[in-house]
């Protein structure tokens, strides 16, 4: 039954996408009834459940929603949406640490029922705007990933674009003006019911320290629809960009890199970028904005978790070549070490060793699964060795051998498979210019 419903939802999205693609000037006027369709709301619930988020200010968890009855909950939501009675609660604002940094990112956690509505709106609107989005945009889009954007950097550097403008948009999710955002949405959507839903979502506000704050800017970061709304707004930047004059733009939501051929073009690109963002009521983050020249022995830049730097080949066949290499950035490595320390913390000494190894393996698989597509063999080896050391230290403490760290290392290393800790050697796939980033062997699977 779920598969049939899923097929119907995909069929709806395909119809909307084809209609939008066939007529770039078309404005859609009959979408509201799609939002509260039973199969769309069911798909929205699956998306929210899969994300496994925390409760909102009503303190209703996903488990509570399941106990109440998903069918019953979705039926009530459909009725409220049909009658125009749905009103979202303010989101619960929390500050979460940024990986590898002392900064904290504001996150707005909406109530479960409100997240379902946001996900349903996204399901209906996304195919319409996907028909317009440009190839330079990679973040939070179907069938596009961070590695697709990283491959563009490899290709452009190989072609001689070795001046890089790197920046990200300051407080992007909280700074987007509501009225300008709605104008961008209205370029494609004329259905007043859907537009009203979006306005109500944007004005729901956030609860912080017992006070509700309703701003005239921002799409609260953390909601299912927020990345789509951000991309809709920043599409205005994408379509105004002239790659021939200002270099090749690579945008992952609010993170930007421009690959340029000369210093003059890089200066012009930064000026153009600043001007376009100002026209949108946004601006680049000064601390993360700079122009970098890629040269052998020179500095590099960080983008999407990787550090990128121009290096020379180390084999006899490649010694005459320079290419853009990438490996985990310092912040990404620090995040990995912090997470491994959390998993092997003193507070977890009462847990079975198998559980600790399982948690370590789960994290290492995910971390290496992203960073393996790069020149990351050394870093992956270091992180795995650090996990071994922390596991040995945890084991020593558990057996009350706090001063015998060497004993713990022997227990781990002398076990047949290092107590089951996964091996990351041999998993790396270095990028190549103008070749699929997954590699030929992996694509054949």
Image (spheres, rainbow, N blue to C red):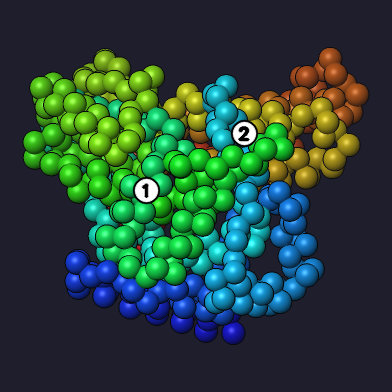
Upstream in the sequence, badge 1 or badge 2? 2
Which numbered disc covers residue 121? none
The residue carrying pointer 1 sits among few (fewer than 14), some (14 to 19) or many (20 or more) residues within 10 Å by Cα, namely: few
Q: Position of residue 74 (x, y in %)?
A: 64, 73
Q: What residue is drawn where x is 10% and y is 22%? A: 264
Q: What residue is drawn where x is 52% and y is 84%? A: 4
The residue to which callout 2 is attached is: 95
Q: Position of residue 194 (x, y in %)?
A: 43, 67
Quadrant of the image containing the N terminus = bottom right
Q: Is residue 259 above or below residue 252?
A: above
Label 2 secondary element: strand
Q: Position of residue 312 (x, y in %)?
A: 24, 24
Q: Is residue 420 left or right of residue 384?
A: right
Q: Position of residue 406 (x, y in %)?
A: 76, 19
Q: What residue is drawn where x is 41% and y is 54%? A: 228
The residue to which callout 1 is attached is: 179
Q: Is residue 32 left or right of residue 248?
A: right
- In the image, 327 versus 271, the foreground residue is 271
| Residue 127 makes an appearance in the image | yes
């Amino acid at each position: 039954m779920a598969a049939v419903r899923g097929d119907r939802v995909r069929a709806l999205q395909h119809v909307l996408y084809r209609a939008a693609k066939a007529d770039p000037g078309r404005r859609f006027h009959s979408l509201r009834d799609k939002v509260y369709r039973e199969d769309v709301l069911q798909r929205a619930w699956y998306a929210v459940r899969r994300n496994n988020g925390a409760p909102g200010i009503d303190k209703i968890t996903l488990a509570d929603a399941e106990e109440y009855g998903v069918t019953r909950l979705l039926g009530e939501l459909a009725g409220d949406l049909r009658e125009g009675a749905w009103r979202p609660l303010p989101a619960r604002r929390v500050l979460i640490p940024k990986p590898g940094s002392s900064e904290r990112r504001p996150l707005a956690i909406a109530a479960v029922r409100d997240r379902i509505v946001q996900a349903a709106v996204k399901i209906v609107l996304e195919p319409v705007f996907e028909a317009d989005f440009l190839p330079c945009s990679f973040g939070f889009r179907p069938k596009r990933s961070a590695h697709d954007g990283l491959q563009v950097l490899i290709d452009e550097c190989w072609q001689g674009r070795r001046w890089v403008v790197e920046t990200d948009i300051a407080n992007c999710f909280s700074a987007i003006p509501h009225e300008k955002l709605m104008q961008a949405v209205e370029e494609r959507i004329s259905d007043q019911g859907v537009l009203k839903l979006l306005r109500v979502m944007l004005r729901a506000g956030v609860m912080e320290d017992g006070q509700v704050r309703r701003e005239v800017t921002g799409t609260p970061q953390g909601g299912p629809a927020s990345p789509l709304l951000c991309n809709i707004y920043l599409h205005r930047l994408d379509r105004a960009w002239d790659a021939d004059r200002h270099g090749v733009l690579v945008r992952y939501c609010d993170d930007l890199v421009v690959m340029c051929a000369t210093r003059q073009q890089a200066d012009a690109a930064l000026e153009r970028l600043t001007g376009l963002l100002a026209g949108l009521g946004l601006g680049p983050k000064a601390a993360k904005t700079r122009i970098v020249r890629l040269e052998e022995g020179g500095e590099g830049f960080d983008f999407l978790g990787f550090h990128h730097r121009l290096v020379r080949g180390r084999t006899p066949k490649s010694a005459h070549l320079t290419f853009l290499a990438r490996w985990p950035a310092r912040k990404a490595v620090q995040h990995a070490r912090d997470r491994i320390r959390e998993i092997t913390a003193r507070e977890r000494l009462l847990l079975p060793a198998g559980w600790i190894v399982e948690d370590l393996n789960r994290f290492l698989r995910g971390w290496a699964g992203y960073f393996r597509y790069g020149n990351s063999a050394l870093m992956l080896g270091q992180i795995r060795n650090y996990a071994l050391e922390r596991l040995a230290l945890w084991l020593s403490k558990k057996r009350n051998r706090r001063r015998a760290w060497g004993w713990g290392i022997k227990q781990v290393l002398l076990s047949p498979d290092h107590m089951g800790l996964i091996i990351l050697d041999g998993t790396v796939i270095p990028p190549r210019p103008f070749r699929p980033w997954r590699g030929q062997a992996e694509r054949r699977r």
